[in-house]
């Protein structure tokens, strides 16, 4: 019964989202001292019909440089994993924009697959990634041409793999980089292992950013660097996702489900925790293109794993921690004007639309429970999952 309700919610969300458009623009955060420039992509709410924008090998349903719709918009910044880039979580970005957010996704210079990966396996990555986030937020609130459309008091973070580590630091975590030897029990140790043995640690501490008010972290990497003491200042609301089979994927020995579970137990503020059954580490990414499936078959198999046998389209998005008004973490997405509501936007507010769409679900298949009180409802009402059914996340 619960699965039937879930599938109905998925169907409603997908059909309603077809007419929605997002504005899209590329950005470049200027270099600062020895820190290189950061490239990225910004998605914004847009009132114009969706077109096609080609960035690299990806073709996105969006409108280039569309005038931004709304004011005092909440901002979410996305941090990719090792070898990823700014487009790695484009489906999550699209979902958040449809809900009334501005989203900026960056390519971390030190370990983006589109840049120079020479230092991607050094300890410097543990310091430079959080610094990239801080610089990018500075840019969005300062030099970005749409800065007047943002509400600086409502900033959220989404990170995957190494991006999850990045989020823990940004939120106030103080990693013990000396413990990075935990990732060296592999056939081909990384340069960071030699740095740990020599005691050649970064001279600067990774920076925090108190402007970030909530975070969604999927399979965060480097979890052994954090214990209870290291996490004691991480008090913002966090939604924590872990794939059941992340330890079977090639993650450079940086991600294991038991390590992520330990993070959940050590955080001073209990996170919303989701263990995703029958999912590999890369299931949090969009489906592979045919070309990628052929060239990287192991990655393709990991992305195809489906928890509970749900349709692949249901495994798309994260973020209730940003939107649920019952939570202190809510960033209150911008309620769109009535003139747009017949085009697939929310019928009453972006919050209602978000909770009825896959944007309220993880791409891993965890969903809003719209029929949780089915004992008090008739079988027919439960099958229909009436609009009065309560919603809530696991």
Image (cartoon, rainbow, N blue to C red):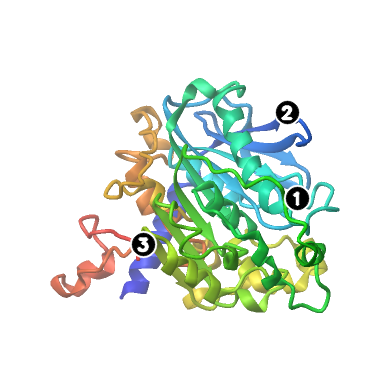
Instruction: Please name the residue shown 64% across and 41% down the image.
Output: 131
Residue 152 can be seen in this image: yes
- Report whether 115 appears left or right of 208: right
Front-lying residue, 138 or 287 = 138
Q: Tag 3 or tag 2, which sits nearer the N-term?
A: 2
Q: CA distance from mark 3 to mark 1?
A: 31 Å
Other-residue count near label 3 (Cα within 10 Å), few / some / many at <14 / 14–19 / ≥20: some
Query: Which of labels 3 and 1 is toward the front?
Result: 3
Q: Is residue 25 above or below residue 159?
A: above
SS for callout 1: loop
Instruction: Please name the residue shown 40% across and 47% down the image.
Output: 322
Q: CA distance from mark 1 to mark 2?
A: 17 Å
Which numbered dot is residue 270? Answer: 3
Q: Quadrant of the N terminus?
A: bottom left
- Report whether 269 appears left or right of 91: left
Which numbered dot is residue 112? Answer: 1
SS for callout 2: loop
């Amino acid at each position: 019964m619960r699965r039937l309700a879930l599938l109905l919610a998925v169907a409603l969300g997908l059909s309603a989202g077809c007419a929605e458009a997002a504005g899209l623009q590329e950005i470049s955060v200027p270099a600062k001292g020895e820190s290189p420039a950061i490239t990225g992509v910004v998605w914004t709410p847009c009132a114009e019909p969706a077109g096609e924008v080609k960035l690299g090998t990806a073709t996105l349903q969006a409108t280039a440089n569309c005038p931004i719709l709304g004011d005092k918009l909440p901002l979410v910044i996305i941090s990719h994993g090792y070898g990823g880039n700014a487009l790695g979580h484009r489906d999550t970005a699209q979902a958040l924009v449809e809900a009334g957010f501005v989203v900026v996704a960056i390519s971390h210079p030190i370990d983006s697959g589109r840049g120079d990966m020479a230092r991607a396996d050094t300890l410097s990555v543990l310091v430079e990634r959080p610094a990239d986030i801080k610089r990018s937020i500075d840019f969005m609130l300062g030099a970005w041409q749409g800065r007047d459309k943002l509400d600086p008091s409502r900033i959220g973070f989404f990170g995957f793999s190494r991006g999850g580590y990045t989020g823990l630091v940004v939120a106030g975590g103080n990693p013990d980089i000396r413990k990075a030897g935990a990732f060296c029990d592999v056939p081909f140790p990384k340069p960071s292992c030699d740095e740990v043995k020599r005691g050649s640690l970064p001279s600067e501490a990774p920076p925090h950013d108190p402007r970030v008010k909530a975070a969604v972290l999927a399979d965060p990497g480097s979890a052994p660097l954090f214990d209870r003491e290291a996490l004691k200042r991480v008090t913002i609301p966090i939604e924590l996702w872990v794939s059941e089979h992340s330890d079977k994927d090639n993650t450079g020995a940086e991600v294991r489900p038991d390590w992520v579970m330990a993070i959940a137990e050590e955080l001073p503020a209990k996170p919303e925790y989701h263990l995703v059954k029958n999912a590999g580490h890369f299931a949090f990414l969009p489906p592979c293109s045919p070309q990628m499936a052929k060239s990287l078959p192991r990655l393709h198999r990991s992305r195809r794993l489906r928890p509970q046998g749900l349709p692949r389209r249901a495994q798309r998005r994260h973020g209730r921690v940003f939107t649920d008004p019952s939570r202190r973490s809510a960033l209150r997405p911008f309620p769109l004007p009535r003139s747009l509501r017949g085009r697939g936007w929310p019928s009453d507010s972006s919050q209602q639309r978000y909770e009825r769409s896959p944007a309220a679900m993880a791409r891993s298949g965890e969903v809003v429970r719209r029929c949780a009180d089915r004992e008090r409802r008739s079988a027919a009402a439960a099958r229909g999952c009436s609009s009065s059914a309560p919603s809530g996340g696991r």
